[in-house]
Image (cartoon, coloured by chain):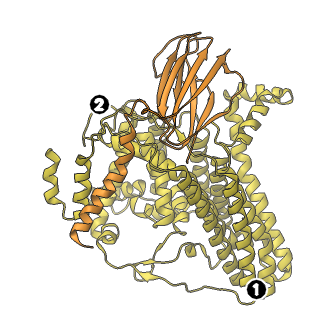
């Protein structure tokens, strides 16, 4: 292959590897973009009513609004978003579902407000599934 | 800007472009992404398509080979040219470098495991051992060739010990060469491998750096002791588990080494799994165990298994047994999982031996090899199905969690170093799209099945004298292979549950 083509291919390969990162750091939806909102209720340390998964499409903005009867830390794995939820006060998680996959959402520290590092509650509360378009 | 000076030493223009690309795009100085992402279940339509192709191809192979079989004693192969990339791996003068690298990695695992930060994400050891080595090396072995024979750190460190003793103490050999009886076979390797896979699948501490270091040290001492007592070559053939695991997978791969001219050859996938005589009972057991743990690994994440464990824990009928097990072993869930872990190989053995009996029965028992000989001839032909499932199941895991190595090489101990400037690399969980994973997984699994069916037919041509026997014997084997492939597809179609 010609020298120039090899050089350009190398640039293109690196660009392809890093382009997904350009979407990281976009904290807010643009004007006109839909936000899909889910209200999740935790009572006595369980999601009520029973919820096994939330399904969204790739590229969609998602807002999870948490309502809990106890203080709790919620962790969305993969996207690595953590929020401390105060009892009886709604708490929000908003993000763009740029990566497809199945992501567990776990809870820990029921009854006390703590940062990360504590071992999670056994198993997931439910799963977020981001499906391709 | 400092790394720009490196560019003048890079002769390959594509690589120059690659590195320049790094600085063209905005910096990715974000915190680590604690990537814990599972694959989406394969959609039903794709699952059914894969299943239909599996069945159709199986019957097509039978139809194609009804009249004239393929014996394939001599398959096509091509001498590997002395390309730079190939020479880098295979030239004897480079062996010293690769052996040193493998010993360095072993020492790094022990040192980082004991003295590094005890976090699975900040210490290099869990990612290095479970992702890069256990999953990544299986990929390399299955696709490229038997790299473990070059990179086995225990073999290489023992060679180093021998050289040191010879050079500085004038001792010819540090082994006693006690002869192992033939019946020992690969049973020791199977025992060690079963402990290893139990640690991987069941043990709660398997992601703790110090626990991994302790296990690596224990296995190192056991292996070196075996090599001292029985000789390096004999122990590698009998007791070193990973020589067999990676060696068996590499029989599927594209390359082989010729014993006569010591040159490496390229060959079609899978043909290295054909055998000229039945393999030993212990090797049959080893292969079946390997296949069963690959499947159990995926099965453990299905809702079916999780519900089964849940039932076992909460059912009143199970309570007395469970309380007794908990009082002895501590963790009831680990005990139940261990029971499943042990039941799977027993199930696999039972089903496979039944299949061999049926093959004998349909081919005519008087003119067929014994059941164990049949098992010895055909067990290797199942490996492509397990390997294909492994490749499909771990594809996105390797691409996503494997990215952890980029920040970890800069800070292997978790002490806050930044040796290569990659500490703040952000793990990209969107590197693979679900649709790509679905389609490639189904293609890989169906391809593995086709290869397995073909290999089984070729073995039958070698084993039986008459074409009618060949065809009749393949019916139970085809049913088994279709069933096995369906199980693999079914697992991929299940939503993963923690």
> Which chain is indicated by disc 1?
B
Would residue B4 appear left or right of B81 to someone viewing this image? left
Q: Residue at x 75, y 61 (%)?
A: B483
- Judged from the image, the secondary structure of the residue bearing numbered disc 1 is loop
The colour applied to the residues of chain A in this rendering is orange
* Number of on-image labels: 2
Residues at circles 2 and 1 in contact by the CB criterion of under 8 Å: no
The image shows residue B27, relative to residue B373, as above or below, that is above
Res. B177 in view? no
Q: Which disc is residue B344 wearing?
A: none
Counting from the top left corner in percent of width and height, residue B223 is at: 48, 52
| Numbered disc in front, either 2 or 1 | 1
Q: Are marks 2 and 1 on the same chain?
A: yes
Which one of the lettered chains is coloured yellow? B
Using the image as rendered, state which of residue B207 and residue A34 is in the foreground: A34
Mark 2, Cα crowd under 10 Å, few <14 / some 14-19 / many 20+, is few
The image shows residue B66, relative to residue B245, as above or below, that is below
Q: Considering only order in the chain, which callout, 1 or 2, is on the residue closer to the N terminus?
A: 1
Using the image as rendered, state which of residue B484 and residue A20 is in the foreground: A20
Mark 2 = which residue?
A: B416
Res. B16 in view? yes
Q: Residue at x 78, y 60 (%)?
A: B351
Using the image as rendered, state which of residue B10 and residue B20 is in the foreground: B20
Would residue A81 appear left or right of B45 to someone viewing this image? left
Counting from the top left corner in percent of width and height, residue B413 is at: 34, 35
Counting from the top left corner in percent of width and height, residue B110 is at: 39, 40
Would residue B134 appear left or right of A106 to someone viewing this image? left
Q: Which disc is residue B66 wearing?
A: 1
Q: Residue at x 62, y 53 (%)?
A: B294
């Amino acid at each position: 292959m010609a020298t120039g083509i090899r050089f350009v291919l190398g640039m293109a390969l690196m660009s392809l590897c890093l382009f997904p990162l350009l979407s990281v750091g976009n904290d807010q939806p643009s004007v006109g973009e839909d936000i899909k909102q889910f209200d999740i209720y935790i009572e006595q340390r369980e999601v009520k009513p029973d919820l096994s998964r939330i399904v969204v499409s790739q590229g969609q903005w998602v807002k999870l609004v948490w309502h809990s009867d106890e203080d709790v830390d919620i962790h969305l794995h993969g996207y690595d978003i953590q929020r401390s939820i105060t009892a009886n006060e709604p708490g929000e998680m908003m993000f763009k579902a740029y990566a497809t996959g199945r992501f567990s959402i776990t809870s820990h520290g029921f009854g006390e407000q703590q940062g990360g590092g504590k071992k999670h509650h056994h198993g997931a509360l439910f799963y977020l599934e981001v499906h391709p378009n | 800007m400092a790394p720009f000076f490196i560019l003048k030493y890079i002769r390959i223009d594509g690589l120059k472009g690659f590195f320049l690309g790094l600085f063209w795009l905005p910096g990715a100085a974000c915190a680590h992404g604690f990537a814990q992402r599972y694959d989406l279940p394969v959609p039903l339509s794709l699952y059914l398509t894969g299943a239909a192709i599996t069945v159709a191809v199986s019957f097509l192979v039978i139809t194609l080979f009804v009249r004239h079989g393929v014996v394939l004693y001599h398959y096509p192969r091509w001498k590997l040219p002395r390309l730079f990339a190939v020479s880098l791996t295979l030239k004897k003068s480079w062996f010293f470098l690769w052996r040193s690298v493998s010993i360095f990695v072993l020492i790094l695992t022990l040192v980082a495991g004991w003295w590094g930060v005890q976090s699975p994400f900040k210490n290099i050891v869990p990612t290095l051992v479970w992702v890069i080595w256990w999953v990544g090396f299986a990929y390399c072995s299955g696709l490229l060739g038997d790299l473990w024979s070059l990179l086995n750190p225990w073999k290489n460190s023992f060679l180093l010990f021998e050289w040191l003793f010879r050079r500085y103490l004038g001792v010819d050999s540090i082994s006693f060469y006690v002869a192992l009886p033939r019946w020992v076979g690969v049973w020791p390797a199977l025992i060690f491998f079963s402990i290893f896979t139990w640690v991987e699948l069941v043990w709660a501490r398997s992601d703790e750096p110090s626990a991994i270091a302790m296990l690596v040290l224990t296995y190192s001492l056991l292996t070196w002791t075996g090599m001292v007592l029985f000789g390096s070559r004999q122990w590698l053939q009998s007791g070193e588990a990973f020589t067999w695991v990676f060696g068996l997978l590499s029989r599927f791969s594209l390359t082989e080494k010729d014993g006569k001219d010591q040159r490496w050859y390229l060959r079609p996938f899978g043909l290295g799994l054909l055998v000229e005589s039945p393999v030993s009972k212990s090797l049959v057991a080893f292969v079946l165990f390997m296949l069963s743990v690959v499947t159990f690994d995926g099965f453990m994440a299905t809702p079916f298994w999780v519900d089964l464990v849940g039932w076992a824990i909460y059912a009143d009928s199970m309570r007395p047994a469970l309380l007794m097990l908990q009082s002895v072993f501590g963790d009831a869930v680990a005990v139940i999982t261990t029971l499943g872990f042990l039941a799977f190989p027993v199930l696999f053995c039972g089903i496979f031996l039944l299949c061999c009996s049926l093959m004998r029965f349909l081919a005519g028992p008087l003119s067929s090899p014994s059941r164990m000989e049949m098992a010895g001839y055909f067990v290797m032909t199942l490996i492509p199905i397990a390997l294909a499932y492994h490749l499909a199941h771990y594809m996105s895991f390797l691409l996503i969690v494997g990215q952890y190595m980029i920040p970890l090489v800069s800070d292997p101990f978790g002490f806050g170093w930044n040796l290569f400037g990659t500490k703040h690399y952000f793990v990209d969980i969107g590197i693979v799209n679900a649709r790509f994973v679905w389609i490639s997984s189904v293609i890989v699994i169906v391809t593995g099945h086709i290869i397995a069916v073909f290999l089984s037919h070729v073995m039958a041509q070698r084993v039986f004298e008459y074409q009618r026997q060949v065809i009749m014997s393949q019916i139970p084997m085809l049913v088994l292979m279709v069933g096995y492939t369906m199980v693999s597809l079914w697992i991929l179609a299940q939503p993963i549950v923690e």
